[in-house]
Amino acid sequence: MADIIETFDEYVAQYEQWYEDHPEVYRSELLALQQHFQELPQNLRGIEVGLGTGRFSEPLGIKEGIEPSIEMAKKALQRGVEVMKGKAEHLPYASMQFDFVLFVTICYFRNLKRAISEAYRVLKPGGAIIIGFLDKEKDIAQSYMDKRNRSNFYKQATFYSVERVEELLKKSGFKNLTYNQTLFGELEEIKEVQTPKDGHGEGSFITVKAVRT
C-alpha cells in the first residue's frame, strides 16, 4: 500500500490532468453520484474516504474526509476540503459519527471488506454508504486491466464486480441497496455527458447506496 501512496504523491499532476482530459467522463460520474445525494436529507455530516484531490468532495458539498497521500491532500485543501491523514481500513473517528460515507477509490483500498466494516462503524443508524466504482466485468475496467503494466496508477488497482461489492455490503449489515450506472461505451468514445440509468449491467461506472441498520 505504501507504494501506491508514493505513486499518488509523485504523479498528482498526472492524476489531475486526467480529469481535464476527460471532462465528460468526470461529469457523468458526478451526475450518477449526485442522484444518490439528492435522496439524502439536507444538512447532513459526512465524509469521503480516499478523497484524493477533492475532485468529488468539492462539487458534492462534502467538507471533510480521509486521504493518505500528502500531495493529494494538499490539492484537496486548496478546494476547501478538510483532510485527515488516514486509511479506509482504520478510520480515525469514533463510532456512529456520520450520516453518510462516500467511497470512489475502492480499487486502491488494501482490504475492501475491512473498509466497508469501518464505514458501517462510523455511520449513525440509518446512515448511508455511497460507493462509486468501475465494474470489473465492463469495458473500461477491462481496458485498464489489459494495460495495467503501462499505467502508473492501475498496476496496483483491484477491480470488483457488482456481485462482490453487494456481497461485502450485505455481510457488513447494510440494507436497502439501490444502484445506478453510467459510462456507456469505451472511455475514449465518451464525448458527451451521460445521464445515469437505474440499475447495473450496462454501464462501466456503478454507484450503489446502502443503509446502515
Image (cartoon, grey):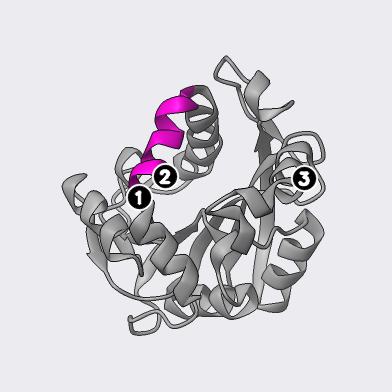
Residue 61 image position (x, y, % from top left): 30, 44
Q: What whole-number distance in Å separates the C-alpha atoms at marks 3 and 2?
A: 20 Å
Does the magenta stretch mainly form a helix, a strand or a loop? helix
The reply to whether discs 1 and 2 touch (Cβ–Cβ < 8 Å) is: yes
Q: Secondary structure at mark 3?
A: helix
Kind of residue sitting beneath label 2: Tyr
Quick check: 209 left or right of 70? right
Q: Residue at x 71, y 72 (%)?
A: 168
Mark 3 is surrounded, within 10 Å at the Cα level, by few (under 14), some (14 to 19) or many (20 or more) other residues, namely some
Tell me the mark number nearer the camera, choosing from 3 and 1: 1
In the figure, 146 relative to 197: above or below?
below
Q: What whole-number distance in Å separates the C-alpha atoms at marks 1 and 2?
A: 5 Å
Q: Secondary structure at mark 2?
A: helix
Kind of residue sitting beneath label 3: Gln
Mark 1 is surrounded, within 10 Å at the Cα level, by few (under 14), some (14 to 19) or many (20 or more) other residues, namely some
Mark 2 is surrounded, within 10 Å at the Cα level, by few (under 14), some (14 to 19) or many (20 or more) other residues, namely some
Residue 76, magenta (yes or no):
no
Residue 12: give its label. Answer: 1
Residue 22, magenta (yes or no):
yes
Quick check: 56 left or right of 149? left
Residue 193 image position (x, y, % from top left): 55, 19
According to the picture, the residue beneath numbered tag 3 turns out to be 142
According to the picture, the residue beneath numbered tag 2 turns out to be 15
